[in-house]
Image (cartoon, grey):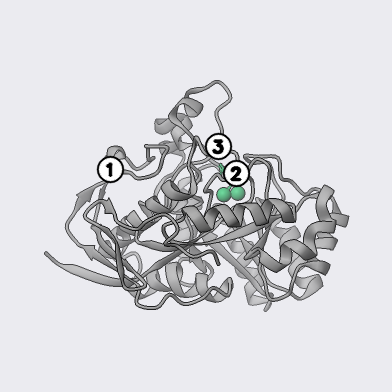
Amino acid sequence: MTTLTLPGLIDVHTHLRVPGGEHKEDFTTGTAAALAGGVTMVLGMPNTTPPIAMADVLAQTRARAAQEILCDVGLFAGASPEHTAELPALGEDAVALKIYLNDTFGTLRVEDVPTLRACFAIWPREKMIAMHAEKRSVAVGIGMAAAYRRPVHFCHISRREEIELIADAKMAGLPVSCEVTPHHLFLNRDDAERLGPLGDMRPILGTTDDVAALWEHINDTVDCVATDHAPHTIAEKQGEKYPPGVPGVETSLPLMLTAVADNRLTLERVIALMVDNPRRLFNLPAQADTRVEVDLTPTIIRAEDMHSKCGWTPFDGREVAGRVARVILRGEVVYEDGQVLAAPGFGQVI
Ligand code: NCD
Ligand code: ZN
Ligand code: ZN
């Protein structure tokens, strides 16, 4: 058995569904899934019910996280036109700001310029502004980064036109960064057809040319691999108006290690994409005495092995190059052979 030891991974894009979506996921199940994926730090998105767009919701959600999480968690604040007055207070305790420019799950949306200006003028300069921006909205985000001379991070970039635009902006010296998801790297339109609602998310799965473009840029333009872990229940996915989003936090490392085995990128690059760049871009604290041990035996991903409350994965049945055997966080064994050993509250709120 070949084993590999890696640093604890950081996933800067997860939906832990607290408050209001606890039937899909909660802080304990979401962070259990993270540990099962070798992820020891996650950032949680604010498109909850109610959204994390007001300081009192952020404070209550952080307090709940402190009791319930198994790995370390930072929470995003969400920008909304109704609550720009809350931005200074949110800026104190949120790890970063999220702006949704396009349609997706939840009600958070920013479509007007005054709200965008308020965000860029008020949000603390040392904290990241991340955007859900598709197609032309990526150009809006690049324009804001240029106008205010401050970093912008693009979530789940999925199309050739988007990654090429970001490459151009980087060439021009603008402070932009981006993440890609494993589902956009390993699935395409054919999979969307095969999977139906279980292969539907925003942005939707790309064409084979879009997927090729993401791989062409994996060693330069792409800064992070983040999962956009977006659990919804099977019942919701089987409904008439099913919500977009797929889980992913516990399958990302095995998929990326499969790409390493296939010589699509190096292990060093995987560590840059999943540990070093996320930490640097979001200014996240180091985790002492923390590591992940991987067993490099080919393994089949099975829905029934998942720890997420939603209990399914779009990668069910896929063979990958290895599995997470053991996770050590701050010197404690928190995951071993499929069992989560950390107690709720062991994780720290960032
Ligand atoms: C996400 C969700 O379910 O919260 N869904 C998705 O399709 N990606 C929202 C988002 O990340 O845009
Ligand atoms: Zn999004
Ligand atoms: Zn998301």
Residue 267 in percent (x, y) is at 32, 71
**Residue identified by numbered label 2:** 19
The residue tagged 1 is 305
- Mark 1 or mark 2, which is nearer to you? 2
Question: Could you give the CA–CA distance between mark 1 and mark 2, rounded to whole angstroms?
Answer: 26 Å
Q: Which of the 4 image quadrants contains residue 305?
A: top left
Label 1 SS:
helix
Quarter of the image where one finds residue 271:
bottom left
> Observer-nearest residue: 69 or 168?
69
* For the residues bearing labels 2 and 3, Cβ distance under 8 angstroms: no
- Disc 3 residue lies near ligand 1 with CB under 8 A: yes
Residue lying at 55% horizontally and 37% vertically, measured from the top left: 244
Is 181 left, or right, of 314 in this rendering?
right
Residue 132 visible in the snapshot: no
Residue sitting nearer the eye, 206 or 132? 132
Classify mark 2: residues with Cα within 10 Å, few (<14), some (14-19) or many (20+): many
Nearest to N terminus: mark 1 or mark 3: 3
Query: Mark 2 or mark 3, which is nearer to you?
Result: 2
- Residue at 56% over, 38% down: 21
In the shown orientation, is residue 227 left or right of residue 281?
A: left
